[in-house]
Amino acid sequence: MKKLLALLLCGTMSIGLLAGCGGTEKESPAADGSLPEDNPEEHITFTYWIYADDYKNLYTSLNDNPVVQYLNDKFNVTMEFQTPAIGSEADNFNLMLGTQDYTDVMNMTYYTESLGTLYEEGVILDLAPYLEEYMPNYYALLQSNEELRRMAYDDEGHMFTLYTLDDVTRNHWGGFVYRRDILETMTGGNVQFPSGNEEPTTVEDWDYMLPLMKEYFEASGLQDTACLIIPAIGYTATGELQAGWGATGIFGLGMDGETVEYGPSTEQFYNYVSKMKEWYDAGYVYQDFASRTNDLFYMPNTSLTYGGAAGVWFGILQQVSDYMSVPDAGLNMDVRAVPAPLDTEHGVTEEMAGSRVTIAPATDARCISSTCDEEKLVRILTLFDYLYTEEGDNICQRGLTAELAADDEIYQKVGLEDGAWYVDENGNYCVNPKTLEADWPDYGMALNGQRIAGGTSAPKEDPANEVRDYHDDAEDAASGQWTKYPTDRVLPSGVTLNAEENAVYQKYYTGINDYVNTMIPKFIIGTEELTEETWSAYVEQLNALGLQELLEAEQSAYERYQER
Amino acid sequence: MVEKLTPGRVIFNILNYGFMILFGIACVLPLWHVLMASVSDPRMLMSASGILFRPLGDITMDGYRMVLANPSIITGYINTILYVLITTVIMIAGSVIGGFLLSRRELKLKGLLAIFLLITMMFGGGMIPSYMVIKGLGILNTRWAVILPGCMNAFYIMMMKSAFDQLSPSYEESAKLDGAGPLTIMVRILLPMLQANVAVIVMFNVIMQWNSWFNASIYLPKSRDLWPLALYMREVLINNDTAKMASSLDAEQAADYTANLVKYCVTVVGTLPLLCAYPFAQKYFVAGVQMGGVKG
């Protein structure tokens, strides 16, 4: 009896074990050997490394994404995704490179070194020779915009990545926000900024705003409060805050628009730090800012921001308006976007500031590995080129139309039989009104193909034709505030260092960055005295750490970029 | 004998009990905080700081509903149970046989074999070579990629060897006189006396496998449906990666309050089975570890 029982248990275990061996690969459109009528080419499978996302319980693998399924059918391919566990992306990517077990398409978000080196080592392909013939739409897009073209190619005319083009001006997702309700409360509804503007725009306006916030918090009885939360390093690496003082983020262009400068070493940055110190001493800057983790998004401070104990912080689009209010708890917040304050005292005007680009390649570009033979490469390029057409872009960014959704199980399951979007009688792109209803679940990117293409939205030929579907008026207003300043001093993201310059960068950058990130908080807190003399000593130390060599390398890379 | 309570003894007892109580609170408090947070109002949870002694706002089970509605969690549970069962069975069999073998006085090259095992306890092959081995074996993206590396542990073999060493040779000699072979001696004579050691290895392995995620994250990149629960849990818990936050739509999603709640719920769901099982296995712990300890 015992033996029988043991046998049974072993059998059950073996069946369970083998159950996973079948895999979940879906039957491809051409699995029966027949070729689809509309696509006579041979069916191919290509692998694609990409970081994972929350699929909102609709499916467990990106292979089952509705847009992926549509593209698979349309191009007679199977995209087989390799998605590492969240939190293990960098390890997984480096393991893939280390073991030379490359997928055919690789998302490069977690690769920080030079793509040129990867090409020289034979890991990735140069796509430039294939572009005009096999990606005519992408090619035309690049040819129509000089800046995009420069960014897409390297100095030698190679193209290693396929970018998703992100129209930042329409999709600006984050920036500084302030609590308007506090000002209304403290002034009895009579907010009068010194600049005369409706919203705070100058440093003087902030000098008016921050004391009111401090007074409000002191009267509130809250224990831990912050009128202004700044990052742990004392400045925003992407330049949002210090842009108001005329200083760039890390690397940017000087006032002449031609010379590369290192933001934290400039006179404008000194003015910024001086003001932060003044505000810190006055109790406006969060007293514990330097001890927080160096998190771009202040996640550890949610108890302050969501608890109603913060006045100004780096927020996101979904925090604006009254979204953060808890009426039941008596917490009514009116959160509004605020641009960096202009340092008019030192002659900074709107025209001199700038921290953002308008249209740029999104960060998660794709490379194609050398494991692809030419036939597969051509098929992959053809598929991706479709995403740069108006139709392909819309399907990828917005999801399936009614015609395509009719056959899709997931769309049926969520009740979007009539598709995610449509074109109205005036030619406008409109989202399905159902998805705008308050009780519509947040499916994120699970219903569209943005994850496979990355980014947010490619520029349309006529943006005016597009209906603002994702954001309400308050969010649009916020986006407008965060993109208020021109962008002529931003170092283009397409500037790439050659091997020699990269060696200089590797040698000096970390030391310089560490020193700056240690010193700036000290200047603000007061553990290091901040005077013109100490600032000069600080700049001298930066030069001793190799700043000039670093700037020379960046300058020559920028000049080559200009010549492309 | 009744112990005489001297002033020194009283002070010692007070300090001793005080310390133990504080230590107990320090262990229980984080668990309590997680439990309270998991049933709190998600919006109020976002604005809370410090340790929660009671739920914030109205008690809600929404987080648990969302967690249990997630097919990955159920799949993860099934996978984890499967990995725990299989690795434990193989681990016990291997450790007992290995330990028994190394404890035999007549075994040739015993020292060399022991050194071989000890080396694996001190040095690992590294991530890339291990990956290449798994790939070379053709078991990448299959259950065996997780099971096989978890099937053997040199520490447990040495533990069992030490346990066998401590048993009197007379048991074995008597069995031999009665005509028992090595397998009968090991399984029917000696092993029943080492139940506590086996229980310790089972418990150690169950806990290790229950919490194990790394191998799966490396060896199962294309087979999410084979992931253990710990890996799904890890995904949920650290789903705030700043690199991806830089992508606009990910950042917008960060304002989802329930995501915070789900983190607490998934922690409870993932640890509860072990928390419930642990007290029942605890009695074997002290005895088992002591028996397996090397004595001078």
Image: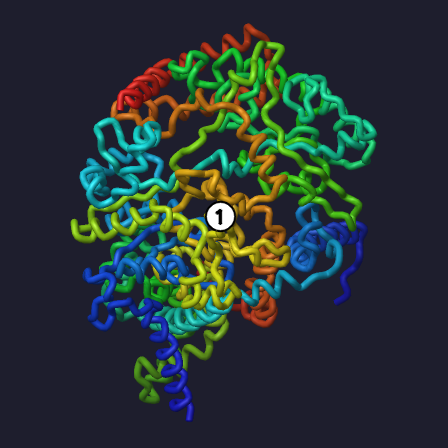
Could you say which quadrant of the image residue A433 lies in? bottom right
- Choose between A377 and A432: the one closer to the eye: A432
Q: Is the C terminus of chain A in the top left, top right, bottom left or bottom right quadrant?
A: top left
Residue A267 is left or right of residue A497, and the answer is right
- Choose between A385 and A96: the one closer to the eye: A385
Residue B270 appears in the rendering: yes
Q: In this picture, is B103 found above or below A102?
A: below
Could you say which quadrant of the image residue A166 lies in? top left
Q: Which residue is mark 1?
A: A426
Residue B210 appears in the rendering: no
Q: Percent x, y for residue A288?
A: 65, 30
Most extreme residue toward the bottom is A1
For numbered disc 1, what is the local secondary structure?
loop
Residue A192 is left or right of residue A488, and the answer is right
Most extreme residue toward the front is A425
Q: Is the N terminus of chain A in the top left, top right, bottom left or bottom right quadrant?
A: bottom left
Q: In this picture, is B178 found above or below B106?
A: below
- Choose between A494 and A517: the one closer to the eye: A494
Q: In this picture, is B23 found above or below A489?
A: below
Most extreme residue toward the top is A533
Q: Percent x, y for residue A284?
A: 70, 24
Please name the amino acid that badge 1 sits on.
Asn
Q: Percent x, y for residue A424?
A: 49, 52
Residue B42 is left or right of residue A23, and the answer is right
Most extreme residue toward the left is A374
Q: Chain of mark 1?
A: A
Picture residue at 46% right of the left edge, 65% below the top: A410
Q: Is the image coloured rainbow, by chain, by secondary structure, or in one colour?
A: rainbow
Crowd band around label 1 with a 10 angstrom C-alpha radius: few (<14), some (14–19), many (20+) = few
Q: Percent x, y for residue A334?
A: 71, 38
